[in-house]
Amino acid sequence: MHMADALLSPAVGGAMWAASAGAIAYCSAKVSKELDDRKVPLMGVLGAFLFAAQMINFTIPATGSSGHLGGGLLLTILLGPYAAFLTIASVLVVQALFFADGGLLALGCNIFNLGIFPAFIAYPLIYRPLAGRNPSSTKVAIASMAAAIAGLQLGAFSVVLETTISGISALPFTAFVAMMQPIHLGIGIVEGIVTAIIVGFVHKARPDIFTARDKGKASIMKSIIPGFLVLALITGGFISWFASEHPDGLEWSIQKVTGKEAVEGSKDGIHAALSGIQGKLAFLPDYNFKKPEGEKGKVSRLGTSLSGIAGALITLGLAVLVGFILRKRQQLAARKPHAHEHAHPHAHDHEHPHRHGGVEHSHGHDHKHSHPHPHVHDHSKPHPEDPNPRHTHEAEVAVHSHEHEDEHGSHDHKH
Amino acid sequence: MSHHIVELKELRHIYPDGTVALDGVTFTITHGESVGIIGANGAGKSTLLLHLNGYLVPTSGEISIGHTPITKETLPEIRRTVGLVFQDPDDQLFMPTVFDDVAFGPFNLGLSGAAVEERVTSALAKVDAGHLREKPPYHLSGGEKKRVAIATVLSMEPDILVMDEPTNGLDPFARRQLMGLMKEFHHTKIFTSHDLDMVMELCDRVIVLGHGRVRADGAPAEIFSNQQLLTECRLEKPLSMQGCPVCGK
Amino acid sequence: MASIDGAILDFKRLDLLASGDTGLHRLDARAKVLVTAVFVLLVISHDRYELSALFPFFIFPAAMIAAGNLPFSYIARKILLLCPFVIVVGIFNPLIDRTIMLQAGPLAISGGWLSFFSIIIRSILTVGSAFILLALTGFPGVCQALEQLGMPRPFAVQLLFLYRYIFVLTEEGGRAARARQLRSCGNKGMGIKSFGTLIGHLLLRTWQRAERVHIAMLSRGFDGSFHSGRRSSFGRRELFFVAGWSLVLIFMRTTNLTQIIGSIVTGRLN
């Protein structure tokens, strides 16, 4: 349920970025004020844990499909809201970069949807009151379930809002809500069960983890949320205003959302065509290659689309060509530093005899010299199928420098 | 050079759950000694090591490094003096690159950029890892990780090197290489290990722990020939002292 | 759990791309972060039905992939595997928005299809730019740039720690999952109960690891603050890069190059 750049308008994306950045700054200040430096590695390693845990799938009972842990609530139960929020946000940053889950602008939305709700609403307002101070396993189960469902419902609703307000998707608000909320009810129930099992397990094995921090902070939470929302609204408003100062499609798409009739109206062809073309005109005011609507409109549109398709193909071709030329230049340029790159393995050649000689002679294990590959680097095993045969030599030296060193090293011994 | 002396007096440590990990440990290690601490799993070795740099506070008893008792005030100095190398280098290497990791300690000592640079270069050179400088730790092999982990401690220029299971999980070549490096470190060395051959080769003194107490303390040859002691402490003779499997001698 | 192993390998491969040594790799990370931000913002600022004007933006990823010596097919494959959510949401557009907006000969194209393809192109561009940024800069580089651009220190530290231990923990998780699978006698999938216990164990080990890492930090004089000796400079090259690309991108945003080129070719300059 990651939000994606492709569905976002700059105003919504920017607003959510601002809200999430604000929340990160606030939580960072809070966490460093707590002065518990144990938390520094703990948050990092738990983030990595969540990342790993999300890779492991389980079977969802009665459906046969598989799911994975979301983990927002679990982290909050373990770390408290501030540290957990930062940890969740950091995991989302890694996912945005490595898996491009959604993209970079959508990161703001995702951090908000998946971080704020479990950490600052579901946990303090639902989990803690329900679980109480010394929770029994039934209490933990009920509390986790309720909190997980609430957190995911809010998150899903937030995705719907962000998508509809952005106006890139044509899905009407009601239909989208009707689609998202039930799905996330299911996800929430599963998340609740899994969270309860894990919390119960940890509770039995390491009760000290939970007794370590035990301060209710729910009252502060209530004042934070409105703060972030205001921040988001201000930024969103500012960006919309800024965008509307400039004649582009943004203006139109926002108008379209605020005036809902326009969306409804789009059912009858002419309206939509008109507003669509209006959008295009407003957005490219200086180019009137579109004939006014009416009888000639169709012809003109045919022409526009033809030239559009031709232009698209050509620009795409140009992009590829530019890429191709740059690549060639890159390879030519790489040939020069090539000699330089080669200097590295040679430099190691000089080191190796020293190392081998020094270590070995002092122990008198001379027979070991015949060992063909002194080091075994498990990670540098050549890939069974090299997915990129176009790897230049330079890149290989950089990436697999171990292998080269070792080869050179053993060559030395043979001489 | 009295500041390399490690003194433990009646050291006791009881964990919050009531486990008695150390039950009155007393010994003195003097400058330049190379001491192996051996014992069964759960004998208290790791707990002991964590006392040496003040991470764990003894329940009772005294511990002093170079005649300085470990207190909150002396802790920074103690931690600079005693370099602790962990069993799993993944616990020790937490920074993005080898350089950052080796520089972590010197920066915390408040050194300037140039001085840090010098420390890093020399520490990496000592463990023969200069070429790994810009690599991220997860792209290193086991042996490389271990050497870099040692460099992260050497860069703080400790007087006493404490290592937990240094040869654990290394291939024979990397193990040899590491032992060669350790021989070159001429300060006080303390290690725990189950690699009794390494202890035999590197240590001039062996302390046997059992159930949180010192069961024996002496020269390796003497300890390893006491069969009864070894059996009681779930140990055995180093392979190099056992008979040849072919000729039986 | 071949899928986990595959994911880890893939992750490492992407990570290793950042160790390339081209002019783009050497550029200060801030420059690349800024240009990527401009790029993403400009791409998504297009109107919902805009398709043709998006094409010129391919010049940016194409140039970066080429000059950065990145494996094109690998990145392309990664991009195409992505965003099922986008497609799921986007596919409703043709169903809902059926008004004809373009007539290409006998082919009538509805607004829904236009916006659907627009969403796909946006997705390729934005997702691609994220991968390219990572491949040219590396995760620590991106973190450092964000920190220099105002990201709070604790969060930067958090990101670096997370990144470091992802490699350790995904492998640990993969091993645990494999061990379970090898004893599951061919039963596919994992019950929720055994999943909970497996993850619980992983969590406990993780917690202990965090405690050990903390000891390791303390024994090297950690006092709660991080020092860094890394310096990078935002010089003339960086300025040129940011200004140059921003100008090009803004020009492409304000001028529909596709239409102009298309018009020239089809002889329909009005």
Image (spheres, helix red, strand yellow):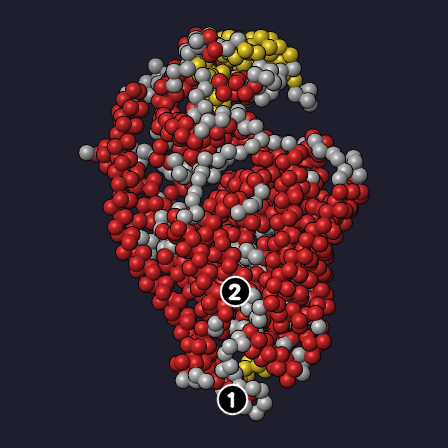
Q: Which residue is mark 1?
A: A299
The answer for which chain carries disc 1 is: A
* Residue A139 visible to an observer of this rendering: no
Residue B168 at x, y = what percent? 45, 27
Q: Is residue C16 left or right of residue C121?
A: left
Q: Secondary structure at mark 2?
A: helix
Q: Are marks 1 and 2 on the same chain?
A: no
Q: Residues within 10 Å of mark 2 (few under 14, many from 20)?
A: many
Q: CA distance from mark 1 to mark 2?
A: 29 Å
Spot occupied by residue A158 in the image (x, y as percentages of width and height)? 69, 58
Horizontal and vertical percent position of residue B102: 44, 30
Asked if the residues shown at circle 1 and circle 2 are in contact, with their CB atoms under 8 angstroms apart, the answer is: no
Name the kind of residue labelled 2 in the image. Answer: Val
Residue plotted at (60% across, 15% down): B71
Identify the residue shown where x is 61% and y is 31%. A37
On screen, C259 above or below B129? below
Give the residue number, with chain letter if any, for mark 2.
C43
Is residue A277 visible to the viewer in this orientation of the structure? yes
Please tell me whether residue B209 is drawn above or below residue C239 in the rendered image: above
Query: Quick one: SS at disc 1?
Result: helix
Give the camera-side residue of A158 and A415. Answer: A158
Seen at 50% across and 78% down, the residue is: A287
**Amino acid residing under circle 1:** Val
- View extreme (front): residue: A245
**Which of the pair B38/C52 is nearer the observer?**
C52
